Amino acid sequence: MSRSERPRGDRFEPDSDNLEVSFTPLEDEAGLMVSDLIERNQFCLFTDRPVSPTPVDPDGHRFPIDAAAAIDAAEIALPTVVSVCVRNEAGEMLAETDHSAYKEFPHGTYSLELCGPIKIYLRVDGPVTVASDVNRTHIDFDGVREVRVGARSHHEGPAATLTTTDDPVDVMAAVSEFSSALKTTSPERSYPTLRGHPPLVELGDRFEIPNGVVSPETGIRLELPPEYDAIYVAAPLAYYVAADVVPGDSPRLVTANGFEHDLDTVRGFETEVERVLKQTFFLDCVTRTEGYYSVDLHEREAIEASLDLDFGWLYDQPLATQLEEYLSIPFGAVEDELPEWRMTSHVAPTPENVELLPFVTNDLAVVRTPQDRPDPSSEVQTTAASEFFRDESFTRSASADGAARSYVQPEATDSLEQSWIGDGAPIGASKATTNAFYNRLDRKPADGNIGITVICNDPRMADERDVVDEVYASQGELPFDVQVHHDLTRTELREVLSTEADLLHYIGHIDGEGFECADGKLDATTLTAAGPDAFLLNACQSYEQGSALIDAGAIAGIVTLSDVINSGAVRMGRMLARLLNRGFTVGSALEVARGDSIIGDQYTIIGDSSLSLARTDGGPPNVCHIRRRADGYELEWETHPSTSFGMGSLVIPLIDNVDEYHLWSGDSRTFSLTRTELQQFLSLETVPVKIDGSLVWSDELDFSEI
């Protein structure tokens, strides 16, 4: 059954026959390509000799993996500098190596965890040496050895579907089962790979929990008024602390030990829930350094001396005890070191939105109840008109009539992104829909190159077509298959829109009647199925047509809310193409591009903003902010989310004398560098750079001018 053909009420059932990871010998040199077939990530292991991977039992690895293969090699080189966790046969971590590392290990049985875009584990018997230079990590053995390569996809899907009535008490019971997806109740659940996707929820005539859905017994209880707004706001917290959600007169967090934490404070219920979630999550990230990943963490160094907490003792305590100890600390004691939260979701408290709650919870989002704001629709149109009259270029509108739609303006938050779940077209937030998330769950494994489709239906917009074609085609290290189409008819466009692709980049005219074609208009609402996973409709008033593509099977797209001038659209198209190529999610790509364009606020996202194209190296997408100083340069390193890096991930910049890990966050970390150090850092990969208020790319920088 195709994505668009699945009825709304059908339950998503995981398909155990779908292979998520594959192992393929490299064609042009010796080595192994490890591919995540669902998330479209790839990672190469270069070897000293050609390899022929042989399937082996995945159970031979200590950590859970999706597939395993054996190869013979005396040396393995990684394409970038990647952190390697080395453990002995008992699972004890012997070392974690990063840049400028050199570690030798005597004869023994070792498990090597490679922290790249795909979780890869190497199991080998014999002596091992791990060394890193500026560009690569090298793993050497004392001769040819059998190396068992195991891999796990970052893809997480729900394991079951719960049914609930629209009675808030039943909804509470359903939310109580979200924590059944947690892979551990230890502080390691703060790692994104150890938080499973909560079960799906569908509305029905009775409450039903499938066999096998069992939430952990933690002795933690969330007492809430039986009202949708309170339940929705508290759902991510209930999931993360594995709490039973039960009716109560006043919202509070309670443990079996008699501990109580009031959630109805002068700061307001929503703010208090947000604080408890962030503080608990953050202190878990610090406490887990006493466990499987004993790393030097910047945030622990920053707070430990001022807190009366024994992290070694805390690590071995039950979750309820940890929670009690965490909340004994004033929020202000940790506030300055909290990671920037990825997502705030504004969720309308209506019964049907319970079906979106598992996806909001999976994002570990801060949840807000939408607040009424003045309708800014006239302001949006005025901005677009002003931009038009400031520029002699033409707009991409095929009609003088603007689309009739209602706008909403979510209240400002300090999260990296915002999503809107309710009526209206949001300004400055993505429009999340149930169809988009279900479409992503239905995404099937795909082998082969990443498919990019570029359509230009107006020869006057050839500038953007040429630019984006060059951008997509220039990424030699990425397996892109780019198809470019010009001046399509309605029949031709319908066929292209129905053909599978990872990304559709449309350049042309759109109005209330649809896409302008060589022989008329094509309305996307007439499509029975949409082929692209993601899309960029770089045309005027493309919101409604983008919504139709989501309804027909797409996952996420960037669309416009108003008319956009052609010159600004060309710049936005090029920037978005480059950002998507570099592994930025649809959401973070738009956030970065908005800050570099006067028309950035005319663009928004429909669907699942966390979708990204493939990334083949080991680091998170990032933006570098550079400022000149009398004695050198100040670098602000701003990381962004991806499939491989989410809330709780660890990151470290490859800068000499920087040996502390940081929690992933959109916040910038600041480093003082010499010109040589800055040039070396920016030569490691092509990244967007903000300098003197303008966004450029590191491969375009002229260091003689900065």
Image (cartoon, grey):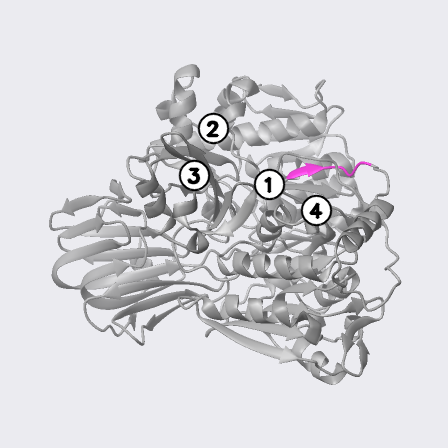
Q: State the SS at label 4.
A: loop
Q: State the SS at label 1.
A: loop
Q: In the image, what residue type sits under mark 2?
A: Leu
Mark 3, Cα crowd under 10 Å, few <14 / some 14-19 / many 20+, is many
Mark seen at residue 283: 2
Between the C-alphas of marks 1 and 2, the distance is 20 Å
Pick the front one: 116 or 656 = 656
Write down the residue under mark 4: 429
Residue 221 horizontal/vertical position (percent): 62, 30
Up/down of 31 relative to 390, above or below: below
Write down the residue under mark 1: 416
State if disc 2 and disc 1 touch (CB < 8 Å): no
Range drawn in magenta: 366-371
Q: Earlier in the sequence, mark 4 or mark 2?
A: 2
Q: State the SS at label 3.
A: helix
Kindly report which numbered mark, 3 or 1, lies closer to the viewer in this rendering: 1
Q: In the image, what residue type sits under mark 3?
A: Glu
Pick the front one: 513 or 210 = 513
Q: In the image, what residue type sits under mark 4?
A: Ala
Q: Name which quarter of the figure residue 580 lies in.
A: bottom right
Mark seen at residue 188: 3
Q: Earlier in the sequence, mark 4 or mark 3?
A: 3
